[in-house]
Image (cartoon, helix red, strand yellow):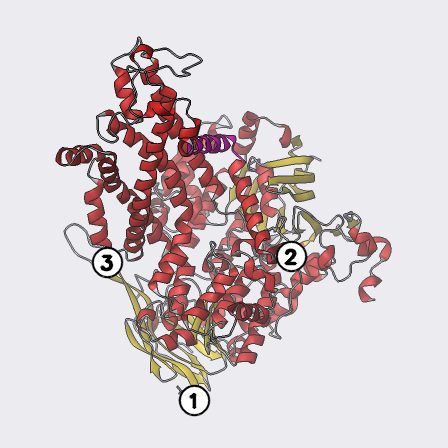
């Protein structure tokens, strides 16, 4: 039983008509769950704040070198919605700038992990059972077994602790998960009849990997990417909590929590708001990721 | 009324999807008497599985039943709560599915799965089954499976498709008392095994005095063991007759087209089949749902769904051609 | 390269074709490899321009034979010659002109078309792979031509396979096979997954295409009534060997092998006249042996109602019982 819905033959011929139709249909699948829409709202908010931080934050200069000992340790008020920290900086503004670093780290980590992991996973999966598979997957196993925080500490011990170095550490331990996921998808997809048909006609291996197998991995890939932004943020916060990553005075969510932990419970706002911010990011991207998974799920006949 | 086991009256089932509502079932009327063997024939997408799911109350959440009733032994099951329903299911309604491989759990032995079924169906009817093993063994024996003792300890993967299906039949027979629903039970089996399995189903049902609903898209199979056949198209029962009558003289244009499409053993090539496609359930035709594809369509056909017209000997057709003796339209 | 056919106009010749699949049943302490004898020494030839039918049930080896022809498997031993060229190797080792010339249409159109691509991309693929688009030609136009040949509207190229019905998907699969202008097409149960009303349309189109383009078909199915109306010569396979081989008329009017008779007598038929065309009912007695555990002597001896002592000892050889009618049985 198949239905065409609102797609008529005339709207099919128009390329904009086709795009509009598939966008509308994707939105329908996405928005069936209100939580996914909530996730989308959160994600858009975070991105907006991160991009326009200097214009949106109430005290943009507090994100740099700034001290105001008179105004230190102020509880939340109308001037400082989230209070000030131990050296008088507005916590809300610092959180907004910290989102920038968080997103930047996520983008960099994913920009390297996803292509690297997907390529290796596709290749290993397509050639599963051969030496190519064994070599790739065993190398992947080695990298998977490296804990990100220990790696970051080691790199920081040798080089300086900077944002770039912690990004490198996280990336190195992140890409193998994409390899694993793509590997399991590719090794089952390659047995489908449409892949056999392409092979029998003589299509090149590159064509088969990128045009037959990869499109069928896309929904899992995009879902994982959305969820990963949240998880990378969490790992980044863990790293900056122990002093790696972005160094003070630049704001980072983990660092802010570390500073505020000593002041608990009297000046509770210094640690609590950054923690809530982290939760906000992870929750938002998780809900959004769930929505992406629904939106990209295959049509039911 | 007491001799009717199942009576589905004017059932409508809708599904909520993107862009509207799929109005799948459009007033289905279907009944089965005690001890009767009824066939339900229709092609893919006509709604036969939906009807069975509605009967067993396992429709997905996005389905609604805006109109219609289903009576089992006189009780309207659409109005029962879940406890009463579980009671009803345990007491004598069982189903055989199309794919025996997925109907059997691969990590449990046949014995364990049979014991579970026996325990569950007995428990809900308030009886304790002392010796599950004997019940299981006799069920396997009745299903004509070789070496039932060893079968109990085997895993589904060790059996062939035909044997697995017979195990499913055994489990259904062990618990069926009133009604057995067989949904395309032989589709995935070879022709010679199909024959065996079908005869087995027919014999067992007769022995137990149970009723049978055989759902299939194959007219030939329906002809083999049923007494009465319904033909379904796009959410309606469009023809119903005693099996021998239907195949000798089909009335509805769809049934005629279907019978004409079956390749003949005598050779002679293929009919072109029936032109067109099944309707879009989001926007079904307002009148008879077969009207867009029917070569005999005339004005009342697009206005409203035709009623059931009795053409003699309990043979009913939902077609305006037979109202007031309009049959000559066909020859016009 | 000129078409090289032998004096009998055979386009494909198979001699002693064997395909065994090794299965590892090693335990911790002992190594054990057994062979699934999917195809166990068959001989056949296909003439240019004919429709050669291969019939059998599951486990008979018909699909394996077809897959060897196309190159999905490499034969374990034996020879397979196409237009004078040896093709007994997998597709990866075959030259491009063979991949262009031999095409296959799979049984299930749902899984033979990539659901994430649209029809345009699917049909473009073979055209691009074989460089069939010259400068100045529009690839869109070629795709529209292909759709036209299978009588699908041109705007379908924007659709994805999920939005098409089963019959339409199969037409797309056929169009894809035709794209490379092959001379030989393997049709693996092309209509088994489709409804009866669509079957006729597809088969008729396939027959028309065969005449139009001078194609040769290797047609595989388990449905004998279908085969009757399609094939010119038929071979029936059982457990990896050919049991009987004859022209279509001979095969159906005078089936010689007991298995053929058993198969023919199990077909469910719809009409009284057809019943007379079937041989008398031969019921299958016993179980189908697994291809791993083929009994000695004639592999059919577990189910044959006419078996004699010699059937348990010696495997029969293929003999020409009547002109152009071959069978493998001791008791004919």
Compared to A265, does C206 lie above or below?
below
Give the residue furthest to the bottom.
Answer: C7
Compared to B217, does A62 lie above or below?
above
Q: Chain of mark 1?
A: C
Q: Which mark is residue A130?
A: 3
**Magenta span contains residue B125:** no
Q: CA distance from mark 3 to mark 2?
A: 49 Å
**Which element is circle 3 on?**
loop
Q: Is residue C75 visible?
A: yes
Q: Is residue A223 left or right of residue C35?
A: right
Q: Chain of mark 2?
A: A
Give the residue furthest to the left.
Answer: A158
Region rendered in magenta? A32-48
**Magenta span contains residue A40:** yes
**Along the viewing direction, whichever of C150 and B43 lies nearer the viewer:** C150
Q: Chain of mark 3?
A: A
Packing grade of label 1 (10 A; few <14, some 14-19, many >=20) is: few
Do the residues indicated by labels 1 and 3 lie within the same chain of the protein? no
Q: Which residue is mark 1?
A: C8
Compared to B304, does A105 lie above or below?
above
Asked whether the residues under the numbered discs 2 and 1 touch, taking CB atoms below 8 Å apart as contact, a structural biologist would say no
Q: Which residue is mark 2?
A: A10
**Which element is circle 1 on?**
loop
Q: CA distance from mark 2 to mark 1?
A: 52 Å
């Amino acid at each position: 039983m198949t239905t065409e819905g609102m797609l008529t033959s005339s709207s099919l011929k128009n390329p904009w008509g086709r795009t509009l139709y598939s966008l509308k249909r994707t939105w329908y699948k996405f928005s069936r769950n209100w939580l996914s829409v909530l996730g989308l709202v959160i994600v858009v908010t975070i991105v907006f704040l991160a991009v326009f931080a200097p214009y949106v934050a109430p005290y943009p200069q507090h994100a740099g070198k700034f001290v105001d000992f008179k105004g230190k340790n102020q509880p939340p008020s109308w001037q400082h919605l989230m209070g000030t920290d131990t050296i008088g900086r507005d916590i809300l503004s610092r959180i907004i700038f910290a989102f920038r670093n968080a997103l930047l780290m996520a983008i960099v980590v994913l920009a390297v992990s996803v292509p690297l992991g997907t390529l290796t996973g596709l290749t290993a999966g397509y050639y599963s059972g051969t030496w190519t598979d064994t070599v790739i997957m065993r190398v992947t196993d080695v990298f998977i077994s490296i804990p990100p925080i220990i790696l970051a500490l080691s790199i920081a011990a040798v080089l300086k602790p900077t944002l770039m170095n912690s990004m490198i550490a996280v990336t190195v331990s992140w890409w193998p998960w994409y390899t694993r996921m793509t590997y399991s998808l590719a090794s089952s997809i390659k047995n489908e009849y449409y892949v056999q048909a392409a092979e029998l006609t003589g299509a090149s291996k590159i064509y088969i990997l990128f045009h037959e197998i990869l499109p069928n991995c896309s929904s899992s890939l995009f879902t994982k990417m959305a969820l990963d932004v949240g998880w990378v943020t969490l790992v980044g916060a863990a790293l900056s909590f122990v002093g790696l990553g972005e160094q003070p005075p630049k704001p980072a969510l983990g660092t802010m929590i570390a500073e505020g932990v000593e002041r608990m419970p009297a000046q509770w706002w210094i640690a609590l708001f950054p923690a809530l911010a982290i939760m906000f990011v992870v929750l938002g991207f998780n809900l959004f990721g769930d929505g992406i998974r629904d939106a990209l799920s295959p049509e039911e006949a | 009324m007491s001799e009717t086991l199942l009576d589905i009256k004017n059932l409508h089932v809708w599904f909520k999807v993107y862009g509207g509502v799929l109005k799948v079932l459009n007033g289905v009327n279907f009944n089965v008497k005690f001890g009767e063997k009824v066939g339900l024939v229709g092609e893919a997408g006509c709604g036969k599985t939906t009807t069975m799911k509605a009967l067993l109350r396992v429709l997905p959440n996005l389905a609604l039943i805006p109109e219609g009733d289903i009576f089992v032994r006189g009780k309207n099951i659409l109005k029962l709560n879940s406890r009463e329903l579980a009671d009803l299911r345990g007491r004598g309604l069982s189903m055989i599915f199309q794919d025996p491989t997925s109907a059997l759990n691969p990590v449990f032995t046949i014995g364990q799965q049979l014991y579970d079924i026996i325990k569950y169906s007995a428990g809900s009817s308030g009886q304790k089954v002392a010796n599950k093993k004997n019940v299981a063994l006799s069920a396997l024996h009745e299903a004509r499976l070789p070496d039932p003792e060893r079968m109990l300890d085997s895993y589904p993967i060790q059996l062939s498709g035909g044997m697995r299906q017979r195990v499913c039949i055994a489990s259904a027979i062990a618990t069926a008392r009133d009604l057995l629903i067989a949904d395309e039970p032989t589709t995935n089996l070879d022709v010679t095994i199909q024959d065996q399995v079908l005869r087995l189903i027919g014999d067992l049902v007769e022995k137990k005095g149970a009723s049978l609903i055989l759902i299939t898209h194959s007219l030939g199979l329906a002809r083999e063991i049923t007494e009465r056949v319904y033909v379904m198209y796009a959410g309606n029962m469009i023809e119903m007759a005693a099996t021998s009558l239907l195949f000798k003289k089909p009335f509805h244009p769809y049934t005629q087209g279907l019978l004409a499409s079956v390749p003949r053993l005598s050779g002679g090539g293929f009919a072109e089949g029936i032109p067109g496609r099944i309707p879009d359930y989001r926007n079904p035709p307002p009148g008879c749902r077969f009207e867009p594809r029917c070569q005999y369509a005339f004005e009342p056909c697009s206005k409203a769904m035709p009623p059931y017209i009795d053409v003699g000997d309990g043979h009913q057709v939902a077609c305006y051609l037979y109202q007031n003796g309009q049959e000559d339209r066909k020859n016009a | 390269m000129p078409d090289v056919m032998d004096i009998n106009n055979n386009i494909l010749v198979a001699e002693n074709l064997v395909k065994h699949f090794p299965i590892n049943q090693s335990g911790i302490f002992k190594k054990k490899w057994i062979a699934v004898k999917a195809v166990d020494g068959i001989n056949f030839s296909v003439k240019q321009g004919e429709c050669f039918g291969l019939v059998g049930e599951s486990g008979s080896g018909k699909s394996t034979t077809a897959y060897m022809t196309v190159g999905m498997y490499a034969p374990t031993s034996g020879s397979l010659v196409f237009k004078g060229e040896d093709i007994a190797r997998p597709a990866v080792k075959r030259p491009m002109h063979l991949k262009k010339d031999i095409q296959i249409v799979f049984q299930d159109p749902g899984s033979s078309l990539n659901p994430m691509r649209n029809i345009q991309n699917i049909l473009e693929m073979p055209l691009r792979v074989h460089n069939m688009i010259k400068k100045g030609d529009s690839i869109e136009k070629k795709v529209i031509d292909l759709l036209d040949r299978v009588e699908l509207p041109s705007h379908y190229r924007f659709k994805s396979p999920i939005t098409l019905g089963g019959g339409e998907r199969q037409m797309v699969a056929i169009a894809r096979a035709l794209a490379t202008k092959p001379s030989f097409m393997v049709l693996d149960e092309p209509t088994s997954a489709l409804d009866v009303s669509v079957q006729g349309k597809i088969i008729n189109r396939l027959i028309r295409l065969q005449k139009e383009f001078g194609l040769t078909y290797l047609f595989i199915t388990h449905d004998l009534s279908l085969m009757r109306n399609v094939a010119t010569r038929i071979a029936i396979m059982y457990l990896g060997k050919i049991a009987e081989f004859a022209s279509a008329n001979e095969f159906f009017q005078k089936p010689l092998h007991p298995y053929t008779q058993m198969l023919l007598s199990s077909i469910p038929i719809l009409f009284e006249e057809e019943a007379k065309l079937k041989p008398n009912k031969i019921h299958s007695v016993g179980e189908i042996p697994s291809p791993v555990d083929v009994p000695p002597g004639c592999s059919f001896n577990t189910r044959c109602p006419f078996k004699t002592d010699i059937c348990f000892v010696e495997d029969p050889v293929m003999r020409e019982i009547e002109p152009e009618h071959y069978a493998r049985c001791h008791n004919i």
